[in-house]
Image: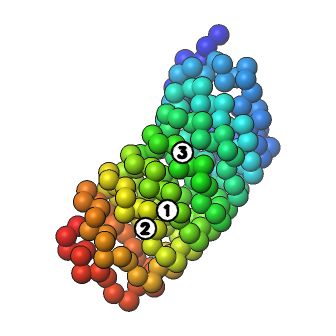
Amino acid sequence: TEDERSRMLLSKRSHEFEGNLDLLCRESNVKQLKNLRVLNLYENQLRSIDGIGILGKTPLEDLNLGGNQLTTLPPDMGDLSNLKTLWLDDNHLADFPIVLCSIKSLEELRMSGNQLHFIPQSINALSNLKTLALDNNKIEDFPMGILELPHLENLWLRQNLLRELPDSLSELTVLQTLSVSSNQLSSLPSSLHKI
């Protein structure tokens, strides 16, 4: 029988997952999750989410993978074509997972508390993004691809290693929140008053 739930809140159940999603991502289980829109897997000591692409067969819109031990994301992550909100806070990601740039439906991406040094230009593919949180990483250069996100309203870059912000920040015409405290900034661009 089909599971009627649209939300599954499975945080802090690491003893059941044993570091991966094998249990959840079985074909037989996913077939029953025809209504799944919200999945919370916060703080489960997940080291791998291989197989997560099968959840692309559900209408999954909100996925919380925060507080785990992820160092990479699998290629099939891009199969989550309905995903609007993705939480990857407090993992061990050192490289920005390029596969995220193929999830065009994303409106909110939270990657604070990782080890990211660099955000690729290809982030500009996330044209529906409204909120981007990259606090508490190791980003040294302002991610210029962000300037091409037409709907970006909230940008958090606190506690990084930024030395300067581009004058072209004013291109983010719908930006409402810009948080850049606790960086290595010695000045702010004169264009900021236009935001």
Residue matched to label 3: 102
Q: CA distance from mark 1 to mark 2?
A: 6 Å
Q: CA distance from mark 3 to mark 1?
A: 13 Å
Please provide percent x and percent y for residue 41. Answer: 62, 42
- Eyeballing the image, is 142 above or below 58? below
The earlier-in-sequence mark between 2 and 3 is 3
The earlier-in-sequence mark between 1 and 2 is 1
Disc 3 is placed on an element classified as helix
Judging depth in this view, the residue of 5 and 60 nearest the camera is: 60
Residue under the point 55% across and 41% down: 63
- Eyeballing the image, is 96 above or below 1? below
Tag shown at residue 45? none
Q: CA distance from mark 2 to mark 3?
A: 18 Å
Q: Residue furthest left?
A: 194
Is residue 5 in view from this perspective? no
The type of residue carrying mark 3 is Ser
Count of marks, rendered view? 3
The earlier-in-sequence mark between 3 and 1 is 3
In the picture, measured across the screen, residue 112 lies left or right of residue 166, that is right
* Quadrant in which residue 178 is drawn: bottom left
Instruction: Report the quarter where the N terminus lies.
Output: top right
Residues at marks 1 and 2 touching, judged by CB atoms closer than 8 Å: yes
The type of residue carrying mark 1 is Gln
Please provide percent x and percent y for residue 70. Answer: 69, 55
Residue matched to label 1: 121
Residue matched to label 2: 144
Disc 1 is placed on an element classified as helix
In the picture, measured across the screen, residue 180 lies left or right of residue 12, that is left
In the picture, measured across the screen, residue 71 lies left or right of residue 62, that is right
Residue under the point 54% across and 58% down: 111
